[in-house]
């Protein structure tokens, strides 16, 4: 028990140390101006990231090697190994609009760090540090106003929210239940500048807001699984299947929740002096750390995963997020509910026994993954200016076994995950992006007493 506590405390200390790496937002998207920014880590870790982002019906031992599925806490009940995962994420985005050229941006950050282990046969526990949302945008709009001229508005944003999560999963027969208890933290900085034509005595306005979140957030999950390992033939005599079939149904859910935020706002009237330098003339608003409540939207998802033997896993998933419930004091945009469809698979040419055979060619030990994801965006209004926009994503990747492979300690794996996606439209604003995740999954047996003959 002392060793267990030491390892957990060590992970928590490492998690807090790694929060400094999250300071750089992993996005440069004008669409991150809405809500709490672009949702992060909805595709899970590198394994499921490559499978279209499946999560609702993925158990921690559904895909091999034993991995961590943070998107449904019920999956932690199936931990049979101690698993450590960490990953780096990179995002490259090309922004383009009709008649306005294009711009390419890149950002790299710590993607996730997580640790999970079995407590009892019916109870699994996990700790993880992941980004929840990312904000990064710089948008300029111009409008001609009668008797004034061209008015230019510039919107800037940066930051994001992260979460430190304690996951518990419990198993009862074919059912498992779980809860994620997350501590949300982070900040979002946003600035709006309104510039009027010079030489007419007009004042420009600049407003900067820094919003800090520090609150608890809960989400839940349920899974049910069963295996078909035989078939009926000739007068009811059962015959064993060469490769059994495992079916997993999963649901994850988070209800609408209010979280506490503190906002600091400074609004000033500015004017250009004789040297054409913008200087503050008057303070309109100066609010320091004002406490308020932000309403997070409810969300739910359901999925099905089918595993054929040890080689093939196929999954499908559907989810809804009720962004129309979202409320952030000071943000006037009305958001739309979103829907997401996911499909993905993993295939490896080898069984678990063949993975341990040195004579087996290496490429037959590799895990091959691919998937698709389609979702609507919660956006219309000043930026979109039309019907609800959408996003389409192609995902793929591989899992590369590394190190010694044994039936006792399983094995470790280096995961490469890729996303190629597009959101928005060329007539308004289109984003073509390429995301890359490099993840490491380590499997081991901890907390077991040694036996001597």
Image (cartoon, rainbow, N blue to C red):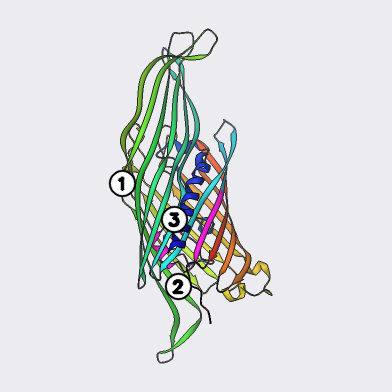
> Which quadrant of the figure contains the N terminus?
bottom left
Q: How many marks?
A: 3
Q: Indicate whether 74 appears above or below 320.
A: below
Image: magenta residue range = 64-88
* Residue 72 covered by magenta stretch: yes
Q: CA distance from mark 2 to mark 1?
A: 35 Å
Q: CA distance from mark 3 to mark 1?
A: 22 Å
User: Helix, strand or loop at disc 2?
Assistant: strand
Front: mark 2 or 1: 1
Q: What residue is shown at x 46% (from left), y 61% (from top)?
A: 116
* Residue 301 covered by magenta stretch: no
Circle 1 is placed at which residue position? 257
- Contact flag, marks 2 and 1 (Cβ < 8 Å): no
User: Helix, strand or loop at disc 1?
Assistant: strand
Q: What residue is shown at x 67% (from left), y 68% (from top)?
A: 362
User: Relative to residue 284, is residue 406 drawn left or right?
Assistant: right
- Residue 11 lies, in percent from the top left, at 48, 54
- Label 2, residues with CA under 10 Å away: few <14, some 14-19, many ≥20: some
Circle 3 is placed at which residue position? 127
Choose the circle earlier in sequence order: 3 or 2.
Answer: 3
Q: Which residue is at the front of the view, 430 or 307?
A: 307
Q: What residue is shown at x 34% (from left), y 47% (from top)?
A: 216
Q: Quadrant of residue 102?
A: top right
User: Helix, strand or loop at disc 3?
Assistant: strand
Front: mark 3 or 2: 3
Q: Is residue 322 visible?
A: no
For residue 246, the mark is: 2
- Residue 275 lies, in percent from the top left, at 55, 9
């Amino acid at each position: 028990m002392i060793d267990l506590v030491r390892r957990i405390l060590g992970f928590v200390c490492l998690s807090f140390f790694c929060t400094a790496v999250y300071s750089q937002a992993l996005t440069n998207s004008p669409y991150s101006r809405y809500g709490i920014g672009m949702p992060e880590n909805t595709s899970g870790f590198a394994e499921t990231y490559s499978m279209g982002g499946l999560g609702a019906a993925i158990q921690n031992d559904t895909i091999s090697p034993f991995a961590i599925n943070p998107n449904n806490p019920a999956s932690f009940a199936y931990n049979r190994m101690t698993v450590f995962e960490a990953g780096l994420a990179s995002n490259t985005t090309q922004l383009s609009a009709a008649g306005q050229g294009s711009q390419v941006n890149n950002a790299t950050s710590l993607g996730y760090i997580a640790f999970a282990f079995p407590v009892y046969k019916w109870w699994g526990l996990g700790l993880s540090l992941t980004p929840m949302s990312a904000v990064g945008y710089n948008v300029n709009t111009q409008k001609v106003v009668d008797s004034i001229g061209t008015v230019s508005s510039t919107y800037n944003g940066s930051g994001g929210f992260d979460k430190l999560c304690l996951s518990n999963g419990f198993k009862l027969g074919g059912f498992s239940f779980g809860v994620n208890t997350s501590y949300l933290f982070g900040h979002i900085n946003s600035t709006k500048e309104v510039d009027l034509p010079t030489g007419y005595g007009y004042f420009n306005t600049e407003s900067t807001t820094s919003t800090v979140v520090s609150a608890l957030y809960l989400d839940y999950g349920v899974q049910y699984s069963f295996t078909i390992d035989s078939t009926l033939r000739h007068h009811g005599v059962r015959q064993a299947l060469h490769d059994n079939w495992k079916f997993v149904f999963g649901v994850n859910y988070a209800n609408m929740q209010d979280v506490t935020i503190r906002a600091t706002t400074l609004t000033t009237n500015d004017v250009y002096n004789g040297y054409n330098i913008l200087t503050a003339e008057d303070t309109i608003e100066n609010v320091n750390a004002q406490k308020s409540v932000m309403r997070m939207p409810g969300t739910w998802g359901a999925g099905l995963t089918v595993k054929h033997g040890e080689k093939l896993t196929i999954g499908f998933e559907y989810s809804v997020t009720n962004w129309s419930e979202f409320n952030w004091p000071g943000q006037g945009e009305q958001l739309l509910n979103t829907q997401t469809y996911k499909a993905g698979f993993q295939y490896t040419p080898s069984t678990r026994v063949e993975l341990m055979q040195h004579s087996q060619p290496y490429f037959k030990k590799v895990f091959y993954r691919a998937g698709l994801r389609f979702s609507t965006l919660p956006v219309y209004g000043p930026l979109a200016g039309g019907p609800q926009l959408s996003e389409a994503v192609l995902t793929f990747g591989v899992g590369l076994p590394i190190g010694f492979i044994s039936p006792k300690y399983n094995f470790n794996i280096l995961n490469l995950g890729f996303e190629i996606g597009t959101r928005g439209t060329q007539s308004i604003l289109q984003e073509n992006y390429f995301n890359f995740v490099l993840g490491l999954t380590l499997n081991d047996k901890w907390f077991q007493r040694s036996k001597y003959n």
